[in-house]
Image (cartoon, rainbow, N blue to C red):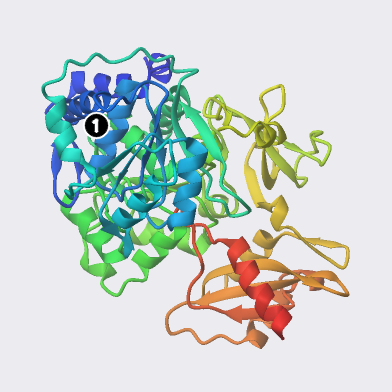
Amino acid sequence: MFKLRYEMSVSQLLRTAIEKCPDSEVIVDEIRRMKYSELDKESTELAAGLTTLGIKKGDRVAVSLPNWHEFIVIKFALGKIGAILVPFNTRFKIGEVAYILQKSGAKAVFFPREFDDINHYGQYLELKESIPTLQHLIGVRFKDESVQNFEDLLELGKGVPFTEVEIDSKEDVSAILFTSGTTGKPKGAMLTHKNLVHTAVAGGEWMRCTPDDVFLMPTPVFHVMGLMFILRTVASEARMVLMEVFKPEKALALIEKEKVTIHPGVPTMFILELNHPNFKKYDLSSLRTGEMAAAPCPVEIIHRIRKEMGMNVLVGYGMTETSPTLTATGFDDDNITRAETVGRPLPGVEIKIVDENRNVVELNTIGELACRSFGLMKGYYKDPEKTAEAMDENGWYYSGDLATQDEKGYIRIVGRKKEMIIRGGYNIYPREVEEYFYTHPGVMEVAIVGLPDSVLGEVSCACIKPKPNAVLTEAEMKDFISERVADYKVPDRIVFVDSFPMTASGKIRKLDLKSQLQSEYQAK
């Protein structure tokens, strides 16, 4: 049964759910409650409407929307046509948007009039004049004579005969997701229907999902984690509750109101919920489990989530290129295992840890994590050089993540190859030191980066965001960390910040942080 589902297209996955539970709710957002049968009907109408614009199999269609039900309708409509979804962040400014539209060759783009204080409407009108491949601007939740409209396309599709195209799930690309670019220009990872569906089904098995589950969706749907949980919900014949923008108290209220059972998210989300002054006002007893990913989580937070939120939260690891989940902790793993490792490979995933020559290293030795899996992308869109750098002829993908693997198969992520700091000839792995900082009761978030130095080559700088009402000093933090790590690992500088530059997936943009600090460091 499950093996057959692994081979399905995105559209076939939806059809399977519709056959079993057409009248069950699948989506709840701020303006709509939608049944499976309604999702099928509207995605078919939109697919038909898009064909009248000349959208066909293989065409790229860009979507920059918040967590609205329309995004999900669009995703399944494109699946029925065989067109390729190109989702991206609603916070992107005109230069970032232009890069993705030009690189992908998108034929159409769906967007809101305004969101995140950005005038998307004006932005796309300007871009259409300079990007010849961009033929159709489609507004969502607004109408204007200068652009086409989502609702009008639905209406148009009602009168158009439509037949779904045939999909080769192993070969046909379902989505091109541009990496978050924490270390450089975004690259477009091509994910096939099988990549996405197999990962969704396997992840549902791992989380023991059932049709009774209710997923909270606080992560952006344009990100691979959000996209995966859309498909995991449908694979489980369950219901998803979309959050337009994550706000901790709103999340707590939705958990109580909608009886949420599964809460995915990044550590920052859980930290903000736990520390909210009204946290104890809400009934969270419906929570069963969740998946935490994208950044390391202190053991203290794992403990509090399990104790105070009553959920058996799991930790997952992966990346855009792997659809994303590769490894995960289990329901029986202890808190320290969940905090210090990212679990073991899911069934069907191969992991190896290699040295700089791509030879396998011994157990418990730091090296680069490489993988082969059912979720692994076809490659980077129109970027054969970057594809060849990352993937070898045997199908192994080299992640750029530094990791170890122990005798039981557990993976511990040490950091990024490009983030490693070489101070006076000694290697410093930022994540290792960050983990120790997280054990301090006054530290909410921390990021360590390397800065150039004329004597040592590089020095390390720790940026710390204190918890509310915590009063920290540089001397105190240096004393604290010097008791826990070797002297060369103690940060040369410690600065305190109110916030960090973040990616949509909840990762700290260390490249931006480093650039900012470097300017300040050189100025001094």
Closest to the observer, 313 or 393: 393
Q: Position of residue 517 (x, y in %)?
A: 64, 74
- Say above or below: 162 vs 77: above
Q: Judge left or right: residue 406 versus residue 243.
A: right
Q: Judge left or right: residue 370 versus residue 63.
A: right
Q: Position of residue 402 (x, y in %)?
A: 70, 48
Q: Position of residue 44 (x, y in %)?
A: 21, 24
Q: Position of residue 409 (x, y in %)?
A: 64, 36
Q: Judge left or right: residue 59 versus residue 448.
A: left
Q: Which residue is mark 1?
A: 211
Give the total of numbered labels: 1
* Residue drawn at x 72%, y 74% as measured from the top left: 491
* Residue drawn at x 65%, y 60% as measured from the top left: 431
Closest to the observer, 34 or 303: 34
Q: Quadrant of residue 92?
A: bottom left
Q: Judge left or right: residue 263 versus residue 176.
A: left
Q: Amino acid at mark 1?
A: Pro
Closest to the observer, 402 or 220: 220
Helix, strand or loop at disc 1? loop
Closest to the observer, 136 or 273: 136
Q: Count residues near mark 1 (Cα–Cα under 10 Å), then give few for <14, some for 14-19, many for 20+.
A: some
Viewer can see residue 266 = yes
Viewer can see residue 214 = no
Q: Quadrant of residue 481?
A: bottom right
| Figure quadrant of the N terminus | top left
| Figure quadrant of the C terminus | bottom right
* Residue drawn at x 19%, y 26% as measured from the top left: 40
* Residue drawn at x 17%, y 25% as measured from the top left: 21
- Say above or below: 242 vs 245: above
